[in-house]
Image (cartoon, rainbow, N blue to C red):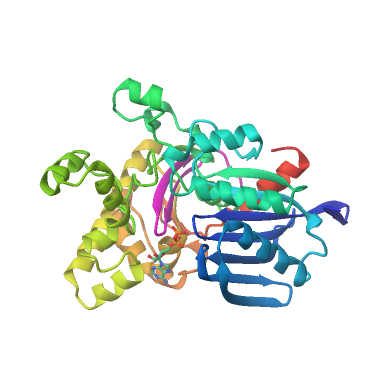
């Protein structure tokens, strides 16, 4: 039976899945309580020494074993859910929610994994060749193993579909926009939406007319300008390469760099695109030192000028977008920091905020900037007109919420 009752409320179990090319992250929830009852990750799929992590019931384990495809990974996850006693039967899992990075022009909200929708996701592969095939592998592996469960796709781009045209099209020939759908789709939408909804509820008591800038800064990074809970603008572009500087991605650059570097090096556009994706950002600017802010911070402490240069450029790019979004929103009530760097690095938050504080009259409590690391709370002083908060993101709970809606029939 997929549902049980608790104090008159129907309870179901749903699983939020994030399938990558060589990994599957998962969290099993009891809904609508939003209680995580199991979680884990399969890594290095395709290898003899793949990693299987599972936490649930009384079990908390990590195994190294051959996991040659996604189907095997899913089989192990489901076996662990049963053997740990987290579920008595796999039939208890009512809905599987799959994260899908690119929803393109088709999806403004989460959708059932129908054949027609799967075809649309497949059609969008050229816009996300890295993730989309893996999402489909994950979907099929779960479909095979749990044929009775409903399946939905939750898109990273959906939240950004409320952008107006002037925020989402590029100044390129009309044919590229219309015929090839070459426009800004953004990413991290599920995270930006979670952060905005949480802030509006917890900090603004559901008041109307809120203006929020969300900074999701992890190894991938993006900002969003959000008015009244709806996305007005976001920094990532056609793909997650655009916008601010990231761990290994350049973010926005003058497009003539492509032609010039091609002339200088003889590399073609695909090779240069790969380098802008994988060898640029913090890693590139620091001269190959690292894409990880922990290493960059360490090197900065030792006076490494390349690390300092990379960190300063990283902060400048984000501060520039904050300025841009301040104008776009006609002011701002709250700036939110989240994700790996936004939640954990007081150094990077300080570098960014110092670049905004004069223009935006920010009053930061620098002690709180340190003490609220890895926690949630306001790091601005009560006197600051613009509040600044750290809020840990939770994309999985958003997937679980949509799973519950799908089960209720209100998706
Ligand atoms: P993604 O989900 O995009 O893979 P995350 O949001 O998990 O990325 O962010 C990972 C990044 O966060 C790391 O690459 C590192 O730069 C940064 N990070 C994580 N923990 C810390 C920390 N304690 N101090 C500084 N930076 C950190």
Quadrant of res 255: top left
Q: Residue 307, how many percent across, how many down?
A: 23, 68
Q: Nearer the viewer, residue 338 or 207?
A: 338
Residue 219 on image: x %, y %: 39, 59
Instruction: Specify whether residue 268 is in view.
Output: yes
Give residue 74's position: percent from left, percent from top: 64, 59
* 59 vs 190: above or below: below
Q: Residue furthest left?
A: 264
Ligand 1 image position (quadrant): bottom left
- Foreground: 185 or 92? 92
Specify the segment rendered in magenta. Answer: 204-226
Write the residue at 61% across / 62% down.
73
Task: Inspect this view and state whether residue 381 appears.
Answer: no
Residue drawn 69% across the image and 76% down it = 59
Please say whether residue 56 is one of the residues in the magenta stretch.
no
Horizontal side of residue 324 vs 253, given as left or right: right
Q: Please tell me whether residue 150 is drawn above or below residue 283 in the rendered image.
A: above
Q: Is residue 196 left or right of residue 92?
A: left
Which residue shows up at 41% across the image and 51% down it? 386
Q: In what quadrant of the picture does the C terminus appear?
A: top right
Taking the image as shown, residue 335 lies to the left or right of residue 404, namely left
Q: Position of residue 325 (x, y in %)?
A: 36, 41
- Quarter-of-image position of residue 353: bottom left
Q: In this picture, is 219 found above or below 165?
A: below
């Amino acid at each position: 039976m997929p549902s049980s009752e608790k104090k008159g409320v129907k309870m179901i179990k749903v699983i939020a899945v994030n399938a990558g090319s060589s990994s599957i992250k998962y969290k099993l929830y009891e809904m609508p309580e939003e209680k995580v009852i199991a979680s884990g990750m399969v890594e290095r799929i395709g290898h003899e020494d793949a990693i299987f992590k599972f936490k649930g019931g009384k079990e908390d384990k990590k195994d190294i074993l051959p996991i040659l495809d996604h189907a095997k990974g899913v089989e192990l996850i489901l076996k662990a859910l049963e053997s740990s006693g987290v579920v008595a039967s796999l039939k208890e899992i009512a809905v599987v929610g799959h994260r899908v990075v690119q929803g393109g022009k088709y999806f403004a909200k989460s959708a059932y994994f129908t054949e027609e929708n799967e075809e649309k996701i497949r059609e969008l592969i050229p816009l996300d060749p890295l993730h989309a095939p893996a999402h489909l592998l994950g979907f099929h592996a779960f479909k095979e193993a749990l044929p009775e469960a409903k399946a939905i796709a939750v898109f990273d781009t959906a939240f950004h579909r409320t952008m107006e045209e002037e925020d989402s099209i590029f100044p390129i020939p009309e044919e590229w926009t219309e015929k090839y759908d070459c426009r800004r789709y953004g990413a991290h939408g599920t995270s930006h939406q979670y952060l905005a909804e949480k802030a509006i509820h917890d900090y603004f008591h559901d008041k109307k007319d809120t203006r929020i800038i969300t900074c999701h800064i992890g190894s991938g990074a993006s900002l969003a300008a959000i008015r009244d809970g709806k996305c007005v603008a976001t920094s990532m572009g056609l793909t997650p390469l655009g916008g601010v500087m990231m761990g290994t991605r350049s973010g926005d650059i003058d497009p003539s760099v492509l032609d010039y570097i091609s002339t200088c090096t003889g590399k073609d556009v695909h090779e240069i695109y790969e380098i802008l994706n994988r060898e640029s950002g913090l890693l590139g600017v620091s001269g190959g030192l690292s894409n990880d802010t922990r290493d960059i911070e360490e090197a900065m402490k030792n006076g490494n000028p390349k690390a300092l240069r990379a960190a300063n450029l990283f902060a400048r790019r984000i501060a520039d977008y904050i300025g841009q979004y301040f104008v776009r929103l006609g002011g701002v009530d709250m700036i939110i920091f989240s994700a790996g760097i936004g939640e954990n690095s007081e150094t990077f938050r300080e570098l960014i905020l110092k670049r905004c504080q004069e223009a935006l009259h920010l009053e930061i409590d620098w002690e709180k900037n340190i003490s609220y690391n890895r926690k949630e709370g306001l790091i601005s002083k009560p006197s600051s007109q613009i509040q600044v908060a750290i809020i840990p993101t939770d994309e999985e709970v958003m997937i679980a919420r949509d799973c519950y809606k799908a089960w209720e029939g209100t998706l």
